[in-house]
Amino acid sequence: MQPFRLFAATGDAVARIDCDGSDMCNVELSMEGSGAQCVAVDPRDPNRVYVGTFDDGVYRSLDAGESWGQVSEGIPHKRVLSISISPSHQENGKFVVYAGTEPSNLYCSQDDGETWQEFSRLPELPSAPGWSFPPRPYTSHVRWIAPHYQDPDLIFVGIELGGVMRSTDGGENWEDRKANAYHDSHAVLTHPADSGRVYLAAGGGVSLSTDAGDTWRKVDDGMDRHYAWALAVDPSDPDLWYVSASHGAGYAHRGNGDARGQIYRRRGDEPWQALTLNGSQETPYMPYALVALRGASGTIVAGFQNGEIMYSDDSGDSWHSFGVLTPELLALSEASYS
């Protein structure tokens, strides 16, 4: 296995994880006490990293996490639970950054975080009055942002709990959730090689669109638990993808070693297959993050709630553990693969 770098949000700090290609990794923590919730790395500039925090807005690093600065001027809501860098929308030599907040709204920056534009029509959708996050039922949030790989005007937003919303004009206008796309959205992905694919992992199960979000179908066959959380798709094979799931939120997030989590793999139209890690199909801690490494087809990294990180370089047939690398883990983003 070749060396690679990941950034993790731990709920308190940011971890830069450098793995040397064996089972050895070096971890450096920064932004301790920040409440880091989500992290995104520019795939074309691995030194450019953005982090969203629980109540302190957005931070940016331009030196791979060596130093950080707050760049959330213009975002009135400081609880930022999703962050994404567009792979297709570029302005003045920089790829556009999106930030999703609680309460649910979306902001974008076209000047590297110096200023932010609000997409005010997102919370005006007909379903918006019903959006509600069960632990804080008076509010909801943007859990995931999925810009399109080819079309800079096509953006998908996952609301927890509300559904998948789509914009086809760069965020000016929005379409409400569609049939068969589960409402408790946790992760949404588009695909670099197939412009029609959109994937959804949600609290009720898993959905797929093959026409860029025009229509959806539920794809839960083979799963014996349906509270899906993390999601990854092989970058070179849109038919090869992975989700993590448990029996419900009460299991997935309890943090006591009884998450009863599973990682599933799907190939094409075959049913989901539960994968075996550490001799068991059930994981004691929830797989909170899945990352399919770019440029390494068949390589998948799993990050667990307790900070353990595991990887497979044979599409999930066998797994190796790096051990517990961070105090906790909420999110992962790949910085480079060399």
Image (tube, grey):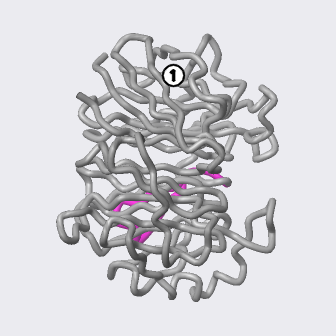
Magenta segment = 204-218
Number of marks in the rendered image: 1
Q: Where does residue 83 sit, x and y in percent of width and height?
A: 47, 59
Residue at screen point 61% across, 73% down: 77
Residue at screen point 65% across, 61% down: 184
Residue under label 1: 310
Residue at screen point 53% across, 59% down: 82
Q: Where does residue 137 sit, x and y in percent of width and height?
A: 80, 69
- Observer able to see residue 176: yes
Q: Is 326 drawn above or below residue 109 in the view shown?
A: above
Q: Quadrant of the N terminus?
A: top left
Label 1's element? strand
Report the front residue among 312 and 332: 332
Residue 166 among magenta residues: no
Report the front residue among 28 and 137: 28
Q: Where does residue 274 sit, x and y in percent of width and height?
A: 57, 28
Q: Is 208 drawn above or below residue 126 in the view shown?
A: above
Which kind of residue does numbered mark 1 sit on?
A: Met
Q: Is 46 drawn above or below residue 301 in the view shown?
A: below
Report the front residue among 232 and 331: 331
Q: Quadrant of residue 96?
A: bottom left
